[in-house]
Image (spheres, helix red, strand yellow):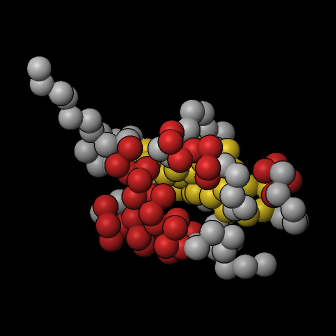
Amino acid sequence: MKKSYRDDILKYAARMYKTQPEYLWARDPNYAVLRRSDNRKWYGIIMDVPRARLGVAGDGAVDILNVKCDPGLYSLLDKRDGILRGYHMGGTWISILLDGSIELSQIYALLRSSYDLVGPHKKLTK
């Protein structure tokens, strides 16, 4: 089994956004929510999910990162190995396998995009 990028992502979120993970559910103690400090919206969640539940080959569980995805990229990313439709999320969220299927630099880019997408939107003035 490949190394999980879980710890790398949590360190990145702490360094870039001063985000500390929130562990909200006693029955899922490994689920780590990443939330913006300005509006409290989620920009990511790391979960360990059985591969069978995701329809992914292999035994046991795999760490995934759910992030919000730009609607224009959604249909392109959804077809890549290592990226799935958002597990337990609606709309344009995707799940990224953290088992090395996707390069860490690409995961960071998707996490940055998600952070921006859930941020405060500037109102247009007339």
Residue 79 in view of the camera: yes
The location of residue 115, given as percent across then percent down, is 38, 51
| Residue under the point 61% across and 52% down | 77
- Please give left or right for residue 5 compared with residue 2 in the image: left
| Residue under the point 84% across and 51% down | 55
Residue 25 in view of the camera: no
Extreme residue in the left direction = 126
The location of residue 33, given as percent across then percent down, is 49, 51
The location of residue 59, given as percent across then percent down, is 88, 65
Residue in front for this viewpoint, 26 or 100: 100
Instruction: Tell me how many marks there are.
Output: 0
The location of residue 43, given as percent across then percent down, is 44, 48
| Residue under the point 61% across and 49% down | 76
Q: Could you tell me which quadrant the C terminus lies in?
A: top left
Extreme residue in the top direction = 126
Q: Could you tell me which quadrant the N terminus lies in?
A: bottom right
| Residue under the point 57% across and 51% down | 66
Question: Is residue 77 placed above or below 92 in the rendered structure?
Answer: below
Residue in front for this viewpoint, 53 or 69: 69
Residue in front for this viewpoint, 94 or 75: 75
- Please give left or right for residue 20 compared with residue 76 in the image: left
